[in-house]
Image (tube, rainbow, N blue to C red):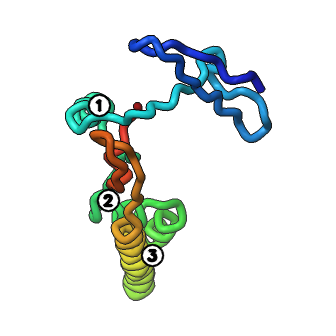
Amino acid sequence: MKTPLLEKSTDGNEEKSFGIPDEAGEDGPGSDKPFAYNHAGLTGVEAERLLAVHGPNALPEKKVPKWKIFVNLLIAPMPLMIFFAAFIEFSIGNMPDMCILLFINLANAGIGFYETVKAGDAVEALKKSLKPKATVKRDGKWQIINGTTVVPG
C-alpha cells in the first residue's frame, strides 16, 4: 500500500489525503490519484446540483406488466406442448380431452401468475421497509439522510 500523499489546499495549509486499499491490501482502481476526504462536506445546494447531475443512488427498477407475466407463463415450452396436444385432440375430435388439457394449461398459468405476483409484492414491501440511511456532512453538520440521495463528494 502506498503511503498517504500530502496535497496543498487553496488556503496554503497542507491536508492529508487517505489512500483506500482494497480487501487484498493493494491499491484500488485509480491508485495514482489517492482518495481525498472532504472534511468540510458539501453544501445543500451543491448536493442538489450533484444529485441532478448524477441522479439518485439507486438501481433502476424494471416493472413488468402483469399481463406480460401471464402471457409468458402460457408461451413457455411445456405449455406450448400442451397446447399442441390439445390441438391434436381437437383435430381427432376428442373434445373432452382437449378441454381437460386447456383447463390444465390455464389453471397452471393462473397459479403461476398468482405466485409470481405475490412474490413480487413481497419483494416490493421489503424494499419499502428497508430504506437505506447514510450519514453525511452537509452545510458543516453531520446529518442522516436517505441513502438514495447520497452524491459523490
Q: Which mark is residue 126?
A: none
Is residue 90 visible to us here?
no
Q: Is residue 14 left or right of residue 90?
A: right
For marks 3 and 2, the one nearer the N-term is 2
Residue type, mark 2 in image:
Lys
Which residue shows up at 70% across the image and 36% down it?
Answer: 22
Q: Is residue 144 above or below residue 119?
A: above
- Circle 3 sits in a helix, a strand or a loop, which is it? helix
For marks 1 and 3, the one nearer the N-term is 1
Residue type, mark 1 in image:
Leu
Q: Which mark is residue 50?
A: 1
Quarter in which the C terminus is drawn: top left
Residues under numbered marks 1 and 3 in contact, where contact means CB atoms less than 8 Å apart: no
Dot 2 corresponds to which residue?
Answer: 68
Is residue 133 visible to us here?
yes
The residues bearing labels 1 and 3 have C-alpha atoms spaced at a distance of 64 Å
Q: Which mark is residue 89?
A: 3
Residues under numbered marks 1 and 2 in contact, where contact means CB atoms less than 8 Å apart: no
1 vs 2, front mark: 1
Residue 62 drawn at (x, y percent): 35, 50
Residue 109 drawn at (x, y percent): 40, 74
Q: Nearer the viewer, residue 20 or 53?
A: 20
Q: Is residue 80 above or below residue 121?
A: above
Which residue shows up at 67% across the image and 28% down it?
Answer: 28
The residues bearing labels 1 and 2 have C-alpha atoms spaced at a distance of 37 Å
Q: Residues within 10 Å of mark 3 (few under 14, many from 20)?
A: some
